[in-house]
Image (tube, rainbow, N blue to C red):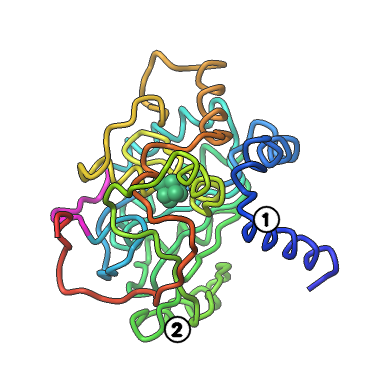
Amino acid sequence: MTVKKQLLHFAAVTARTLHLWPAINRTGVFNRARRRKYPDTLVHLDVVITECCSLKCRDCSNLMQYYKSPENLDPQEIIESLKSLFCVVRVHELKLIGGEALVSQKALAEILVYLRDEARGSYDEIRIITNGTIMPGDALVKVMKETPGLTVVFSNYGKLSVRKDEFSELCRTQGIDFILNPEDEYWWDYGRPVKYNATDRQTQGKYAGCYARRLCTSLYRGRLYVCPRQAHGIRLGMMPEAEGEYVDLLDTSLSGDKLREAVLGLTDRKDFISACRYCIDGKLVKIPKAVQISGPLDHEQ
Ligand code: SF4
């Protein structure tokens, strides 16, 4: 670790220990720094292409374990949403996610063709996030090879990721960039999606220190959300419909400066969102990753 990184790490640990994140965040210092470095750019965007997954992880922070009838999403609606977004901002890192993205290969290929042919100047990097359980078909491999800036990222769940070696070898031979994450990672516990008894100050603290709200701005069913947990929590009826906490990219009355302001305002947001009341507090508890269950969980249990 370089000296600069060591100092930053020490400052972050000190801020967490002294519960300084809410106060630091409210100054807007991070938002201003990000906006200076990436003007009119979303640094990270998670594009949800399916609710279906080939694994059943008990502690999925995106709440996939609660879907009883998960669906593959309409690629044309996703493309229309991206077109609307790209009219007003660029995206630095665009992630295509599920569920498991490879479950919906036809949609994935269709979206990649759009990004390759019509949106090349609107993003810097594309990442396909996969759990390494499904091999891509020939049509998908072809478009993956032809899409500039594309990297396949394997969430490595050890033995559960049964096709990761075969898939990563295919990437290697086909000249597709890939990253195989280390196997021994853990997850942070976000808790069950129930309303927790926290004060506004404590909830602000969760939001300020939250990894998801900084790295996982999410496009889901035409709406842009601060984080995927809120997007799916609302869809599943576990969290309240949160007017003013998302941007409807398919709303034709929103365009130009108004849309840009709404999009950047969402990603620069300082105040917590209502969904943060449904996350466990910010104690950063580590849990084993990808513990499997046999079927969908019942929210009420
Ligand atoms: S709801 Fe709030 S605390 Fe929970 S993951 Fe999303 S931004 Fe973070």
| Residue visible at 34% across and 25% down in the picture | 243
Q: Amino acid at mark 1?
A: Ala
Q: Residue 277 in the image: state x and y as whole percent.
A: 36, 44
Most distant residue in the top direction: 253
- Determine the image quadrant of residue 247: top left
- Can the viewer see residue 112? no
| Residue visible at 47% across and 71% down in the picture | 154
**Above or below: residue 97 compared with residue 252:** below
Q: Which residue is mark 1?
A: 15
Q: Residues within 10 Å of mark 1 (few under 14, many from 20)?
A: some
**Above or below: residue 89 compared with residue 297:** above
Between residue 120 and residue 89, name the one nearer to us. 89
Q: How many marks?
A: 2
**Above or below: residue 84 compared with residue 110:** above
Tell which circle, 2 or 1, labels the residue nearer the N-terminal end. Answer: 1
Q: Amino acid at mark 2?
A: Asp
- Determine the image quadrant of residue 99: bottom left
Q: Which residues are magenta?
A: 66-73
The kind of secondary structure the magenta stretch mainly shows is: loop
- Determine the image quadrant of residue 191: bottom left
Position of 212 with respect to 296 (left or right) is right
Q: Residue 39 in the image: state x and y as whole percent.
A: 70, 33
Is residue 191 located in the magenta-colored stretch of the structure? Answer: no
Q: Quadrant of the N terminus?
A: bottom right
Disc 1 element:
helix
Position of 292 with respect to 33 (left or right) is left
Q: Residues within 10 Å of mark 2 (few under 14, many from 20)?
A: some
Between residue 43 and residue 166, name the one nearer to us. 43
Between residue 256 and residue 107, name the one nearer to us. 256
| Residue visible at 41% across and 66% down in the picture | 130
Most distant residue in the right direction: 3
Q: Which residue is mark 2?
A: 165
